[in-house]
Amino acid sequence: MSTDTVALHPVEPHPTVLAADHAPVWHGWVRTGSLLSVREALAGIAARVARKIDGVGVHVFANDAGVLDWCVFHHSFRCVLFPECSTSPMPATEVSVTVTGAPVFDGVWRVAGTLSVDSLGVVTATTFGVEDYWASQYRELAGQCDHCHKNRKRTVTVLLRNDAGDVLPVGRSCLGDYTGGSVRAVVVAELLALGERIGEAFGVVATATPDSALLVDAVAVAHLIVDAYGFVPSGYAGQGEIDTRTRLLMSIASAEHHAPEFPPAALTDAQVARARSSIDTILADAGASDYLTNLRAVCAEQWCQVTGKGNKLGLLASLPTAVARIVGATQRRDARAELPSAWIGNLGDKVELAGRVDLVREIDGAFGVSWLVKVETPDGLVKTFTSAAGFADLEVGQTVTIKATVKSHETYQDRRETLLTRPKLVSAER
């Protein structure tokens, strides 16, 4: 965004009394620390409006509002629609957006809101230039038109209001005729969309500070959290436990009153380098699952959205474990490639073998639960299907010694494997 565009619409102290030519568009509160994002978002909106509507200006004013009640469910301050919602105190900034040069129809009427009706008949009210939620009280006017006096299924009904508070519903297609054709369609379209655009811009900013973060910082912090607490999936946290995604959010998008446990600003060069290596590992992996495909798409960007609808924070929280699986699988493939493709012993031989656990998988069969265990030994790969004590607790990478009987010689994926039966776990070391 150019400096000139921002300079045209600076954030200024909120005036005690608005000038007569300022029409209110949006008024609300955002979390302290987000004004820069608000300013940039509004500057972009204002620039688009200024290009399409001659003489219409957008202005934003801001004041420190102290500590207000933050609705933790709707992510907004002073939630008046749902007073029963849970709230918590939060530092806030009051913001007011106004326009100058808004057209007046027939000398007295201004656009004050719209009523949109979807295919299911649900009415969505949007307020423009008056007090919050004003249009919501006129939902029953959806579909009506004071110009043609036809009540039909309209997608959008425009609400006009004068200084006396009188309200007239007008169909969008009739608006030009109602105003004597003095208003271009593009002017109406931009003004009707202005309140919605500003609401969306503030909605992104108001959910958290900041609303996005450097990808490498988020990955580095995720590694530190997993190192300290292990990976806890969302929805699986125990009593008093916090899942990894929430810890990551608390560190990279923390509120002003909350000190992050792993602040991005405190990351070391080594921690950032580790994160870059992990990102490269994900991008280089050829896995075709939806999970890995989505993770690669996130890692291909420099920035990542961390709050609001559509954020990928859950994927980033799981990235360290995904990297560990990929690296582990690569190491196992490399180690297996160095093993001889050979069968061990003769059928019926009793053997004692030492090696590294390559696979532990639960098998739910007709005779109950058992485990498929594969072990890499210096003489070749062995496997067994067993429910014997101790095998279910083994982990990949452990060094084990087992006694068993050779049952058969098999080939799997062009590699010779020795199937063992009646195994006994002699020892297991981590």
Image: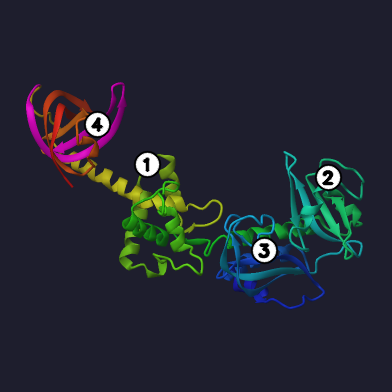
Residue 205 vs residue 150: left or right? left
Q: Give the magenta-colored segment's residue range.
A: 348-377
Residue density around tag 2, few if under 14, some if 14–19, many if 20 or more, within 10 Å: many
Q: Image point 92% across, 62% down: which residue? A: 106
Q: Position of residue 77 (x, y in %)?
A: 63, 63
Residue type, label 4: Leu
The image quadrant of residue 202 is: bottom right
Looking at the rendered structure, which numbered label has been put on residue 143? 2
* For discs 2 and 1, the disc positioned in front in the rendered view: 2
Q: Image point 41% across, 48% down: which residue? A: 233
Looking at the rendered structure, which numbered label has been put on residue 287? 1
* For discs 1 and 4, the disc positioned in front in the rendered view: 4
Q: Earlier in the sequence, mark 1 or mark 4?
A: 1
Quickly name the residue at label 3. 45
* For discs 2 and 4, the disc positioned in front in the rendered view: 4
Q: Whole-Å distance between the Cαs marked 1 and 3?
A: 41 Å
Q: Disc 1 on helix, strand or loop?
A: loop
Residue 392 vs residue 191: left or right? left
Q: Position of residue 184 (x, y in %)?
A: 83, 58
**Is residue 17 visible in this depiction of the protein?**
yes
Residue type, label 2: Gly
* For discs 2 and 3, the disc positioned in front in the rendered view: 2
Q: Whole-Å distance between the Cαs marked 2 and 1?
A: 52 Å
Q: Earlier in the sequence, mark 2 or mark 3?
A: 3
Q: Disc 2 on helix, strand or loop?
A: loop
Q: Disc 3 on helix, strand or loop?
A: helix
Tell me, yes or no, whether the highlighted magenta stretch contains residue 355. Answer: yes
Residue 188 vs residue 283: left or right? right
**Is residue 415 visible in this depiction of the protein?**
no
Q: Whole-Å distance between the Cαs marked 1 and 4?
A: 24 Å
